[in-house]
Image (cartoon, coloured by chain):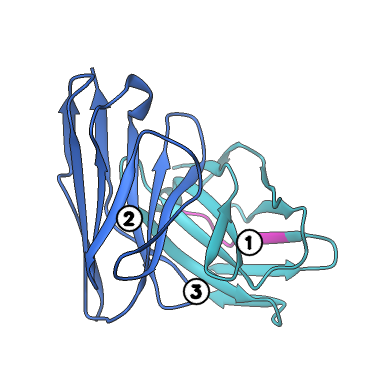
Amino acid sequence: SQTIHQWPATLVQPVGSPLSLECTVEGTSNPNLYWYRQAAGRGLQLLFYSVGIGQISSEVPQNLSASRPQDRQFILSSKKLLLSDSGFYLCAWGPSIEQYFGPGTRLTVT
Amino acid sequence: KQEVTQIPAALSVPEGENLVLNCSFTDSAIYNLQWFRQDPGKGLTSLLLIQSSQREQTSGRLNASLDKSSGRSTLYIAASQPGDSATYLCAVGAGNMLTFGGGTRLMVKP
């Protein structure tokens, strides 16, 4: 069966510090991969998606970037965090029309 | 641009009641509609997926319907239990992308 992992589970970072969140999927190959952000009191916003290694599409202009160095690994990064980057970050994978979500990372920028 | 709205935003019911959560979308050109459950501080759990050619899906006490022409979906929960307390999200899919509603926060009181 397929499983999706995210780490860390929680993170507190000062403004201006770098960020690296990791997502890995097991039990499948060549999945579509997604990064979402859920800010307090707001819905899920799609940040990035990837249909293959090295192929990244960005949905909104922002302070973040994504990379897919391996088939089942998706990384969300920032060189300098802003207060507005605080939120709950969710990674998801999908074979095609469905999406399955990881446990999320709670990021607080102070 | 697809917009997804969920009504009500919050709902509190006594245990045992049958209830209906509503989801509406503006663009009927969808591939599928997916209902998720999110517990506080957790990721999303997929409940039901309705493909565009289907009108409803059932899983246990849950029944989801889809009316593409009117841009509406409902999630029916029978005989609600305190364990059903969570936020319920609907998401409409087009291609590999999902657009989420803001969610309905459900509280089932014992």
Q: For mark 3, what is the residue?
A: B60
Q: Residue at x 69, y 48 (%)?
A: B3
Q: Amino acid at mark 3?
A: Gly
Image x and y of residue A15, in percent: 23, 19
Q: Which residue is mark 1?
A: B76
The cyan chain is B
Q: Position of residue A30 (x, y in %)?
A: 32, 79
Query: How many neighbours does mark 1 have within 10 angstroms: few (below 14), some (14-19), or many (20 or more)?
Result: some
Of the residues shown, which amino acid type is indicated by label 2?
Answer: Cys
Which is nearer the N-term, disc 3 or disc 1? 3
Give percent across and percent down for residue A90.
Answer: 34, 50
User: Which of the numbered marks, if any, corresponds to residue B94?
Assistant: none
Q: Which residues are magenta?
A: B73-81
Dot in front, 2 or 1: 2
Q: Quadrant of residue A69?
A: bottom left
Closer to the camera, B98 or B33?
A: B98
As measured in the structure, the alpha-carbon distance from the residue carrying label 3 to the one carrying label 2 is 27 Å
Q: Is residue B107 magenta?
A: no
Up/down of B58 relative to B44, above or below: below
Q: Is residue B13 placed above or below B33 in the rendered structure?
A: above
Q: Which is more toward the observer, A61 or B52?
A: A61
Q: Which chain is blue?
A: A
Q: Is residue B55 left or right of residue A12?
A: right
The quarter of the rendered structure image containing the C terminus of chain B is top left
- Badge 3 density bin: few <14, some 14–19, many ≥20, Cα 10 Å: few
Name the chain under label 3.
B
Amino acid type at mark 1: Tyr
| Residue A91, numbered label | 2
Instruction: Indicate whether B19 appears above or below A24.
Output: above
